[in-house]
Amino acid sequence: MSQYGEDALIEQPAIELFARLGWETVNCFHETLGTSGTLGRETTSEAVLTRYLRNTLEKLNPGMDSEAIDLAVEEIVKDRSSFNPVQANREVYRLLKDGVEVTYKNADDEETDEVVKVIDWNCPENNHFLLASQLWISGEIYKRRADLVGFVNGIPLVFIELKSTARRLEHAYYDNLRDYKNTIPQLFWYNGFIILSNGSQSRIGSMSASWEHFAEWKKINSEGEKGVVSLETMIRGTCDKVKLLDIVENFTLFSDAGGSLVKLVAKNHQYLGVNNAIEAVKKIRENKGRLGVFWHTQGSGKSYSMLFFCQKILRKIPGNWTFVIVTDRTELDDQIYKNFAAAGAVIEERVRAESCQHLKELLGENHRMVFTLIHKFQSDSDCKYQKITDRDDIIVLVDEAHRSQYNTLAANMRSAMPNASFIAFTGTPLMAGEERTREVFGDYGSIYNFRQSVEDRATVPLFYENRIPELQLINENLNDDLQDIIDNADLGEEEERNWNGNLPGNIT
């Protein structure tokens, strides 16, 4: 191979980096097949490495009957070619995230139900991480060779397509990835996310994302870092064991809001911002329920950040949490509710407050999600708004938290839920005179401003051109003509004075 080629300049350094992150690495160009072969595959059409999968299932489920393990493996590797590719991916995702439910007869011939854990999401080191390079995969007709595939417990969660630095990165998507998805679709039934790189540019996206929705990953650990576009930043930021499992478990959504099912993987700013907010929730007692201001500019996916925030809390922080999503405009309420519903986050009916009374009923009950306009906190009297619940496991997400949060309605909201915690989501920075937002919600917890959004192509740039309109008086007899109109209108003296008073002062 040329010392300046793709392999030497891009692939080998990437493999070395995975090794430093604790991954086992293996070159599969000359893979030997069979149970004792390189990967334990019987044929190159197998996308799941059952040897590693079975070993890990036995480790993660100690003492479980071998038949339960066999059934779990069978369910994971079964043919899903009759499914839409995204539906197949969602089905597998649920198995990985929540475990495989199996029913079998035990040694006493009794029917037994078990849930077989596939991935240990809480302790990454309990899992097996393997990076396979130059991996051959056979489809029904064609055979393809993938550059890098990252397996977790034998499941191909990460797919990486590399190009030489001389090639445009778009070619990795249009010329290679689209072909792979058509010719070896079984590999993508299991995919967590896809990375495309030519060394100098790198982007990440889901298996259903169009090219426009593949995004850069510039920061690894915090928003305060200087953003760097590189394959190393991408790998360290997404394929570190802890971060990889976090992204797949807590920052992945399936949505059918547009009429067709799509898979969404969080972008860099959403991942870092939501994790900042999660840290505030972990210190909810210390900060007295003030979870901060989440300022991500308009158009950067703020409503999906809300979804990731709620999803991760429900998944990772013990408690009987209820989320109250508050907006100040009907169109915002509609948009956020539809996004939550399309992603499967709304599991109950009639959780949108239809009236002030209905809102009180919802808050007095035990729901996972409640959606309301702040105007529903109106009071019928001048008396102090009545307390509805003492619960301290309610988190209120206020969208566009500006001046509507300082008035009577906001005071009523806090009277109704005195022990609730509050986080503000806004697409615009806090302006002068809005210092009370910090008093109510706490300081900024996450910032993703307009400049950053434009640089990341999440928002189209806004151009302002200062122009002075050119005005020209083309009727030199304008005053005489106006006087003729007044005379001919037969106005009274008072009407005439009023009429003249409405004339522009600079007309003489």
Image (cartoon, rainbow, N blue to C red):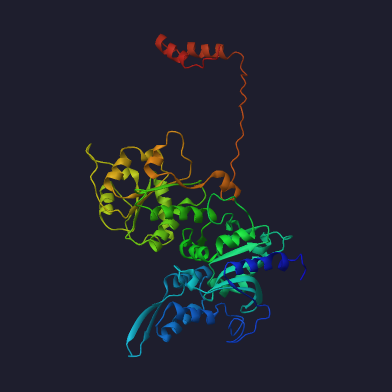
Q: How many marks?
A: 0
Q: Nearer the viewer, residue 264 or 81?
A: 264
Residue, far bottom:
108
* Percent coordinates x, y for residue 381 in the rendering: 22, 38
Inspect this view and state whether residue 369 appears.
Answer: no
Location of the C terminus (image quadrant): top right
Inspect this view and state whether residue 406 appears.
Answer: yes
* Left or right: 134 in relation to 130: right
* Percent coordinates x, y for residue 309 in the rendering: 43, 56
Q: Nearer the viewer, residue 56 or 374?
A: 56
* Left or right: 376 in relation to 178: left
Above/below status of 52 relative to 425: below
* Percent coordinates x, y for residue 56 in the rendering: 48, 78
Residue, far right:
2
Above/below status of 380 relative to 358: above
Residue, far top:
493
* Left or right: 143 in relation to 274: right
Location of the N terminus (image quadrant): bottom right
Q: Nearer the viewer, residue 340 or 163?
A: 163
